[in-house]
């Protein structure tokens, strides 16, 4: 069954959607959408450095995303600039460096459009192993960190008072984001990763009665988006990654029409 490229694409997309659902909820609750975009933009630099060093691109993406996370934390502690300004600087600087680095390596043939927008139909059996192994690590980490992450989202001071170490939790959460971006890059591409994180979670927000329910519904919305997007891509010969994102956007619009507004679970502090 996995010898069929469309089946492999469907299995890969479903595995990614299940992982990005709960992670995307935390991104929405913590108001970290711009941070997700920054990490995604830094992915291109990771690919370029990995190709230059002759290592797997996923390793390069994870390394650069982790370095960007650490740099952001250090710059935030200096207090010189606001978080959104720092994120804007890091996002565009990393993307520009990645584009320059890729263009400078003229001896390599790099599918820049594939990196930016993904190519889920080219997923191999080995990629499936990486996607599900990485997704398992991320989901396991989220389960272990769920309570401290929720507490820090509502109030970092309260979490600190309860001995939950919100700063360490934030670093762990950023590393989990780096893992997801590394495994998602080939499927939906660098520019669409943030959309797959945010849109299903935003659609689930109006339907969920609590944090756990929203995490499950976000995964379900992501899976439906993958199935609908790939089916539409096959039927109308449209790009697969953007088709998945548009399907997720359609679900979000339906959630606005069909569902009454519910209290947002939880009510977060502003978070970088």
Image (cartoon, grey):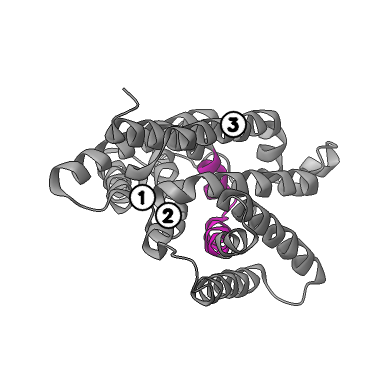
Q: Which residue is mark 2?
A: 189
Q: Which residue: 62% across, 71% down?
A: 90
- Residue 269 on image: x %, y %: 65, 52
In this view, the mark in front (2 or 3) = 2
Circle 1: element type? loop
Sequence order check, earlier mark of 2 and 1: 1
Q: In the image, residue 251 lies at what x, y percent?
A: 29, 42
**Residue tagged by mark 3?**
139
Q: Are marks 2 and 1 in contact (CB under 8 Å)?
A: yes
**Which residue corresponds to the image point at 76% horizontal and 77% vertical from the top-left?**
80
Q: Seen from this angle, which residue lies furthest top?
A: 1
Look at mark 1 in the image and give the residue it sits on: 119
Give residue 37's position: percent from left, percent from top: 52, 60
The quadrant of the picture occupied by the C terminus is: bottom right
Q: CA distance from mark 2 to mark 1?
A: 7 Å
Q: Nearer the viewer, mark 2 or mark 1?
A: 1
Name the residue rendered at 31%, 46% in the picture. Answer: 244
Give the structural element (helix, strand or loop) at label 3: helix
* Residue 37 is inside the magenta segment: yes
Q: Do the CB atoms of the residues marked 2 and 3 lie less than 8 Å apart?
A: no
Please state the horizontal and vertical placement of residue 12, each as a whole percent of the image. 41, 35
Q: Is residue 207 visible?
A: no
Crowding at mark 3 (Cα within 10 Å: few <14, some 14-19, many 20+): many
Indicate the quadrant where residue 211 lies: top right
Residue numbers of the magenta segment: 23-44
Categorize mark 2 by other alpha carbons within 10 Å: few (<14), some (14-19), many (20+).
many
């Amino acid at each position: 069954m996995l010898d069929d490229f469309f089946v492999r694409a469907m299995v890969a997309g479903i595995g990614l959607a299940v992982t990005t659902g709960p992670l995307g909820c935390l991104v929405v609750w913590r108001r970290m959408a711009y941070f997700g975009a920054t990490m995604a933009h830094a992915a291109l630099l990771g690919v370029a450095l990995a190709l230059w060093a002759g290592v797997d691109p996923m390793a390069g993406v994870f390394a650069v995303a982790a370095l960007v996370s650490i740099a952001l934390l250090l710059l935030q502690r200096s207090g010189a600039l606001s978080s959104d300004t720092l994120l804007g600087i890091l996002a565009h600087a990393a993307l520009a460096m990645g584009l320059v680095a890729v263009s400078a390596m003229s001896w390599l043939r790099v599918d820049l459009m594939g990196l930016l927008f993904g190519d889920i139909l080219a997923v191999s059996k080995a990629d499936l192993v990486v996607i599900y192994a990485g997704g398992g690590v991320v989901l396991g980490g989220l389960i272990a960190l769920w309570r401290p992450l929720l507490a820090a989202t509502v109030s970092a001071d309260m979490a600190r008072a309860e001995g939950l170490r919100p700063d360490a939790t934030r670093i762990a959460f950023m590393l989990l984001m780096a893992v997801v971006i590394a495994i998602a890059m080939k499927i939906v591409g660098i520019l669409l990763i943030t959309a797959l994180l945010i849109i299903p979670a935003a659609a689930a927000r109006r339907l969920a009665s609590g944090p756990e329910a929203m995490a499950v519904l976000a995964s379900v919305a992501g899976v439906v988006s993958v199935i609908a997007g790939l089916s539409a891509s096959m039927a109308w010969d449209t790009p697969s990654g953007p088709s998945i994102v548009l399907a997720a956007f359609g679900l979000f619009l339906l959630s606005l029409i069909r569902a009454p507004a519910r209290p947002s679970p939880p009510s977060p502090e502003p978070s970088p």
